[in-house]
Image (tube, rainbow, N blue to C red):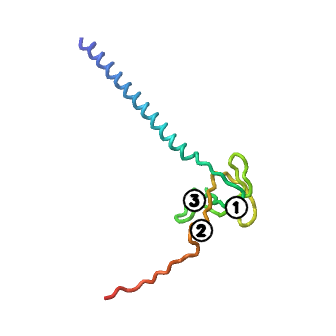
Amino acid sequence: MDMVKAGEERLLQLNELQELREEAYESSRQYKEKTAKTHDQKLKVKKNFKYGDRVLLYNSRLKLFPGKLRSRWTGPYTVTKVFSYGTVEIQGEDGNPFKVNGHRLKEYIEGAVNEGYVEDLSLQKPPK
């Protein structure tokens, strides 16, 4: 009789374990859906460039060989032509146009950084 009772108890434990697994799978699925939704919301930002826009180009080589204080953005470049499916033709200061993916570009805002501005601070010895 003990064997029958132990068998029934074991079946109950197995059923509880299966329910716990199903709950874990369900919560994992919900988490993945939620993170995918937030990720997709961030990606849906359309970059619409027009002829004459000033843009910065992302330098992906610096991702492989990082420099501490090096900017990963080069430019500014001027948009010369916009193709379908996000391809953009840009032209640098040298005048040679080349095509890049629009995801590698961002808008260049002129005057955002004070170029050539240096603040001079004179240090004085503290009085004794």
Tell me, for residue 78, which label it has, or none.
Answer: 1
Choose between 96 and 13: the one closer to the eye: 96
The amino acid sitting under disc 1 is Thr
- Could you tell me which secondary element the residue under label 2 belongs to? loop
Residue located 69% across and 45% down the image: 85
- Could you tell me which secondary element the residue under label 3 belongs to? loop
- 2 and 1 marks in contact (CB < 8 Å): no
Q: Which label's residue is closer to the chain start, 2 or 1?
A: 1
In this figure, which residue is indicated by the disc labeled 3?
65
* Measured Cα–Cα span from mark 1 to mark 3: 27 Å
| Side of 6 relative to 41 (left or right) | left
Of tags 2 and 3, which is closer to the observer? 2
- Image spot of residue 106 (x, y percent): 61, 56
Q: Which label's residue is closer to the chain start, 1 or 3?
A: 3
Residue located 57% across and 63% down the image: 71
* Measured Cα–Cα span from mark 2 to mark 1: 16 Å
Of tags 2 and 1, which is closer to the observer? 2
- Could you tell me which secondary element the residue under label 1 belongs to? strand
The amino acid sitting under disc 2 is Gly
Q: Quadrant of the N terminus?
A: top left
Q: Quadrant of the C terminus?
A: bottom left
Residue count near mark 2 (Cα–Cα under 10 Å), binned few <14, some 14–19, many ≥20: few
Of tags 1 and 3, which is closer to the observer? 1
Residue count near mark 1 (Cα–Cα under 10 Å), binned few <14, some 14–19, many ≥20: many
Q: Is residue 87 above or below residue 111?
A: above
| Side of 33 relative to 83 (left or right) | left
Residue 124's quadrant in the figure?
bottom left
- Image spot of residue 17 (x, y percent): 35, 26
The amino acid sitting under disc 3 is Phe
In this figure, which residue is indicated by the disc labeled 2?
111
Residue count near mark 3 (Cα–Cα under 10 Å), binned few <14, some 14–19, many ≥20: few
